[in-house]
Amino acid sequence: MDTERPPQIIGFREWVALPDLDLPAIKAKVDTGARTSSLHAYDIEIINKGKKSFVHFKVHPLQHDFSVVIKCRALLVDQREVTDSGGHKETRYVIQTTMILCGLKKQIELTLTNRDEMKFRMLIGRAALKHFHIDPSSSYLAGKTIKQKRFLRELREKMRMP
């Protein structure tokens, strides 16, 4: 993992990739008030294989669009009680995955929760923000990679098909 670079400046919202989950592009909001990052997930199911447990879940990667569905699978790392910004407590499944932002690959923990009612499908918490400085007045300073642009273009084309 690349951690020797000087801190990158990012905006309060950015495009990230989660390659282990086959999510090349998902819009995320930086949330310095949250310790752990969280990802929109639904139809969550735990599958036990020997001594390991896996989480199978689905993601709507695009804001305001429930037609695009990505099926994901990850090793279950933990279950934690999380208090959201409204003070509500919820037990969430925790996974570990690779996040790519500004060309920097990092292993991060993600809690899984249904964010259908939220504007952003992902929040990036403090634990994942080491090596980044945040400019709260800017957005999308990292831009999109060629792979992210291609993925989003293909999704738009599929959505236009009858």
Image: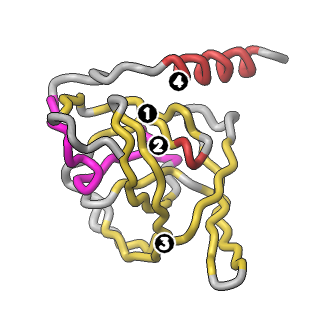
Q: Measure how far apart labels 1 and 3 are at the Cα level.
A: 24 Å
Q: Which residue position holds label 4?
A: 148
Residue drawn at x 29%, y 51% is 128
Q: Measure how far apart labels 3 and 2 are at the Cα level.
A: 21 Å
Disc nearer the start of the sequence (1/3): 1
Q: Residues within 10 Å of mark 2 (few under 14, many from 20)?
A: many
* Amino acid on which disc 1 is placed: Lys
Q: Position of residue 134 (x, y in %)?
A: 16, 35
Q: Is residue 153 left or right of residue 112?
A: right
Q: Which residue position holds label 2?
A: 121
Indicate the secondary structure of the residue bearing disc 2: loop
Depth check, mark 3 against mark 2: the one in front is 3
Magenta stretch: give its range.
116-136
Residue drawn at x 46%, y 75% is 78
The foreground one among 86 and 132 is 132
Q: Is residue 81 above or below residue 131?
A: below
* Amino acid on which disc 4 is placed: Gln
Q: Is residue 8 above or below residue 91?
A: above
Disc nearer the start of the sequence (1/4): 1
Q: Are marks 1 and 2 in contact (CB under 8 Å)?
A: yes
Q: Are marks 3 and 4 in contact (CB under 8 Å)?
A: no
Q: Measure how far apart labels 4 and 2 are at the Cα level.
A: 16 Å
Q: Position of residue 140 (x, y in %)?
A: 32, 23
Residue drawn at x 34%, y 36% is 104
